Image (spheres, rainbow, N blue to C red):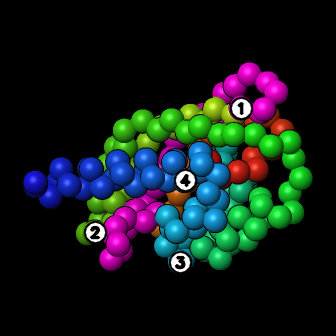
Amino acid sequence: MNAELKLRLDLSDLYASYCACLDAGRFEDWPGFFTEDCRYRVVARENHDRNLPLGTMDLQSRGALMDRVYAVQSTLFHAPYYQRHIVGPSHIISRDGDVIFAEANYLVIRTKRDQPSEVFNAGRYLDRIVPVPDGLRFADKLCIFDSELIPNSIIYPL
């Protein structure tokens, strides 16, 4: 298998594994998809397009992601719901040595136990991905959601 095809398959596996982890509610495994010095941001498209710094969520380091997991599992009280991520094929925007800059569209469906499923969030990921000994990891994950309004609040990672 040539290197380009292997990279594309590895990227596809990274995104699929990331979504499967979140959809299964294995939030304690979520930080493992990131480097130690990562950054995870959730930003409205309007703010991103205008280069405005305000984000809905901004976590800087794997430790901050672990704090978010603790909050989701231990301190936040909300009506439970399930998520289902649908992610389009990733597109490699550019490379800088081993560093990969990629983009992928996403859709998150939310299902509360007593209600029909609904589109919760739609947007795109802009990611900086780096190789580590056991595969690829997100060094930066920017989740840019399209709607200016989000239902209630974002509790679980996108």
Tell me the CA gap for discs 1 and 4. 17 Å
Of residues 116 and 50, the one nearer the viewer is 116
Judged by depth in the image, the label closer to the viewer, 4 or 2, is: 4
Residue 98, label in figure: 2
- The magenta stretch is 111-138
Residue 50 lies in the magenta-colored region: no
Residue at the (29%, 60%) spot, across then down: 95
In this orientation, which residue lies closer to the viewer: 94 or 154? 154
Q: Residue furthest top?
A: 116
In terms of secondary structure, where does tag 2 sit?
loop
Height in image: 22 above or below 61?
above
Q: CA distance from mark 3 to mark 1?
A: 32 Å
Q: Is residue 105 placed above or below 72 in the rendered structure? A: above
Q: Amino acid at mark 2?
A: Asp
Q: Amino acid at mark 3?
A: Glu
* Quarter of the figure with the N terminus: bottom left
Magenta-drawn stretch contains 134: yes
Which mark sits nearer the N-terminus, 4 or 2? 4
Q: Secondary structure at mark 3?
A: strand
Prevalent SS, magenta region: strand
Q: Residues within 10 Å of mark 4 (few under 14, many from 20)?
A: some
Earlier sequence position, callout 3 versus callout 2: 3
Q: Which percent across, then down, holds residue 88? A: 42, 36
Circle 4 sits on which residue? 21
Which is nearer the N-term, disc 1 or disc 2? Answer: 2
Label 3 sits on residue: 36
How far apart are the two marked residues, 4 and 2, measured between alpha carbons? 25 Å
The numbered disc on residue 111 is 1
Which of the two marks, 3 or 4, is nearer to us in this view? 4
